[in-house]
Image (cartoon, rainbow, N blue to C red):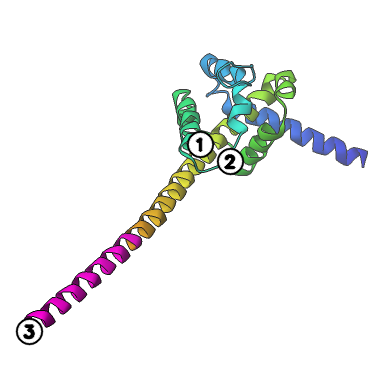
Amino acid sequence: VTRLERMVANVRQTAQKETYRSLSVLLTQECRTFLDTLLLPHETFNSSPLTWLRKEAQSNTAQAILASLNKLTFLRKSGVEQWELSVITPNRLKFLARLGRKATTQYLQRLNEERRYPILMAFVHEALIEVTDETIEMVDRCLWALYKDSKKELEEFQHKNFRSLNETLRMYQQLAKVIVD
């Protein structure tokens, strides 16, 4: 068991080093600064930007859509969509993103750069995809709700018009009888 544990630990350490080496091209000073600021408290978000990005929308309101769009704007201004993370396997990216989603900001701050930056990059890249999907889904739900409401209003309007039209036809029918008599 001990030998197997050492082998697994060695493979994990090699994977971490290889991941960091693969991403080192993207890790400019600007990128590092952005990733480090994700872990610091920020007055705009009432928490760290990382915590703010982790929060999912709770409803399909216009306010929730705007909050989601703010997240998208934040991530796009930071250049996240230009990051080429295809050098890392999708399973490794998912694993790192899951770590970023679950780990506390304090834990991530204490990690060495070799572990912290790949985790944050994977999480932020995954967050961009998730927030985009979430925003589209919320807009679709809002549009569907508006469609259903407008369809119901149209049916009510048509029903009132038909009633009015029927009453008018009855009146003309009675008027025609009077004229004929």
Q: Residues within 10 Å of mark 2 (few under 14, many from 20)?
A: few
Residue 62 percent location from the top left of the image: 45, 38
Residue 132 shown left or right of residue 160 in the figure: right
Measuring from the top left, give residue 120's x and y in whole percent. Answer: 62, 27
Residue 149 quadrant: bottom left
Mark 1–mark 2 CB contact (< 8 Å): yes
Instruction: Locate the C terminus by quadrant.
Output: bottom left
Q: Quadrant of residue 8?
A: top right
Residue type marked 1:
Ala
Number of residues whose C-alpha sits closer than 10 Å to that of mark 1, classed few (under 14), some (14–19) or many (20 or more):
some
Instruction: Provide the residue designation for mark 2.
Output: 58
User: Within the image, what quadrant is residue 24 found in?
Assistant: top right
| Badge 1 or badge 2: first in the primary sequence | 2
Observer-nearest of 34 and 72 = 72
Specify the segment rendered in magenta: 156-181
| Residue 60, position as x, y percentages in the image | 50, 43
User: From the viewer's perspective, is 58 left or right of 180?
Assistant: right
Q: Which residue is situated farthest in the right direction here?
A: 1
Q: Secondary structure at mark 2?
A: loop
* Residue 172 lies within the magenta run: yes
Residues at marks 1 and 3, CA–CA distance in whole angstroms: 66 Å
Q: Which residue is mark 3?
A: 180
Q: How many marks?
A: 3
Q: Nearer the viewer, mark 2 or mark 3?
A: 3
148 to the left or right of 110:
left
Q: Nearer the viewer, mark 1 or mark 3?
A: 3
Who comes first in sequence, dot 2 or dot 3? 2
Q: Which residue is mark 1?
A: 64
